[in-house]
Amino acid sequence: MQSARLHRSLHRSLHRSLLCLLLASTVSPALVACGDSGAGETDSDTDDTLGETETAGEPLYDLGEKVSQDCVDAMAQLDAFTAAAGDATSMSAAYEGTALQAYIQRLDGENARTDDSAITTALAGGGELELIDAELWVHYALLEGLRTYVAAPEGGVMDPYHVWDDAHCIWSGAWKSVAETAEGWSGSYTDVIVADVDAAFATGHDGILGDPPAASIDEWVVPPQKQVIEKNQYRAIHRHVTHFASLAQTNGDALAARRALRWFEMFEHRLDGRNTAGITIVKDMLAGDPGAVDAAVILREINDAFAKRTRGYASLAIEGGELGVPGGYKGAVEGSVYTKLLYPHMVDAGFDVAGLEASWDGYKQAIRDDDMAAAQQHSDALVAAYCDYQVQTLGIETCTAGADG
């Protein structure tokens, strides 16, 4: 591993040096940063299929090679914590004073959160509901860490490999199993969450270029893959909420209602500003009498907000004048993942999901090609479908991309 990595590093350094000498002989020295080992360079050619990339040469580091030991140790301890679920004494012993608690405390500091306090308070309570709280707050804390780390390369960070690898560590050690379970709760629609996220982590990693501290990212690759990774976590959460809400309704199960509530809280902010009133409706229902839970109402309130978000991304690049630029493509990728939260319900309502997928693929390609005619054609088809879904299926009075209520 070390010799292969050294070979790759030397190869790229030699390539940059030769390129710099060539530029220096033909361009003003003021425009050539020969000491900048990789900043701003782009050595990947991305094809037109989301999730696939071809790189000129191998990446400098393998995926996972620069992960923090803190994350590795925390994920190992998470297995013990999960195995102790339901037993207050065992759960406390598997959390307090361990690498898992230390990592969540680190994430609290980085994200200005107080998850560790909430977890220890719940464990001290020791009741069935409190132990569910503790279990899911651990996952919530890790989700927020994953989101922070996977977004960091786009925001600018000294070592994008390191943060990307810690996000991948959290995915592999905690959230991958969440997604695997969720794939079985999508009715007649076949969910493919895990494979999508695995591919996005690999592709996004290949879009990180150069060696820290002069590393850079391919804007056509890393930010879109960040969206694939993050929004697929919301797909998994969506399935957990609806599954446990259904169990609560069918069985009058207070524990299932509590699980649905805590899962919902992980993405309730996605409803804010789109269906803010729906947040209160869902939380009050799940916190009340489990016999009064109506899973169809909960699904409608959640999908109200996501249908509006998806409708917005179906035309955002055109309205924002972002055809032919990475930002426009990133937004279209985000919309094409958000829509998958809706697909189980849309399939049941008779929508042509395969046709929607083809329209999203065409729309993304048209943005890359800076092809306004094709982009408009695909956008119109998407907007029409989501407006029909909003009005005819969800009962929203007027189709919208952003109106609250």
Image: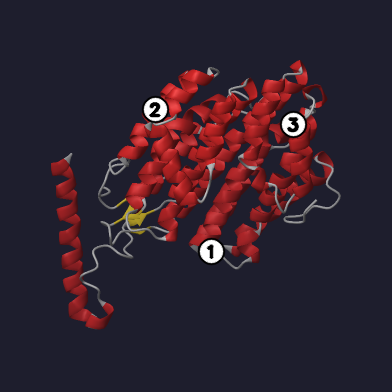
Element type where label 2 sits in the image = helix
Q: Which mark is residue 348?
A: none
When asked about the image quadrant of residue 251, the answer is top right
Tell me which label, 3 or 1, sits earlier in the chain. 3
Amino acid carrying label 1: it is Asp
| Tally of numbered discs | 3
Q: Cβ–Cβ below 8 Å for labels 3 and 1?
A: no
Crowding near the residue tagged with mark 1, few <14, some 14–19, many ≥20 C-alpha atoms within 10 Å: some
Crowding near the residue tagged with mark 3, few <14, some 14–19, many ≥20 C-alpha atoms within 10 Å: some
Crowding near the residue tagged with mark 2, few <14, some 14–19, many ≥20 C-alpha atoms within 10 Å: some
Amino acid carrying label 3: it is Ala
Q: CA distance from mark 3 to mark 2?
A: 30 Å
Q: CA distance from mark 3 to mark 1?
A: 49 Å
User: Measuring 48% from the left and 25% from the top, which residue is drawn there?
Assistant: 92
Q: Nearer the viewer, residue 398 or 291?
A: 291
When asked about the image quadrant of residue 279, the answer is top right
Q: CA distance from mark 1 to mark 2?
A: 49 Å
- 263 above or below 222? above
Q: Nearer the viewer, residue 57 or 293?
A: 293
Tell me which label, 1 or 2, sits earlier in the chain. 2
Q: Relative to residue 159, is residue 8 drawn left or right?
A: left
Element type where label 1 sits in the image = loop
Q: Position of residue 20 (x, y in %)?
A: 20, 70
Q: Which mark is residue 287?
A: 3
Tell me which label, 3 or 2, sits earlier in the chain. 2
- 321 above or below 92? below
Q: Nearer the viewer, mark 3 or mark 1?
A: 3
User: Measuring 37% from the left and 38% from the top, which residue is drawn there?
Assistant: 71
Q: Which residue is mark 1?
A: 370
Q: Position of residue 325 (x, y in %)?
A: 50, 64
Q: Which residue is mark 2?
A: 77
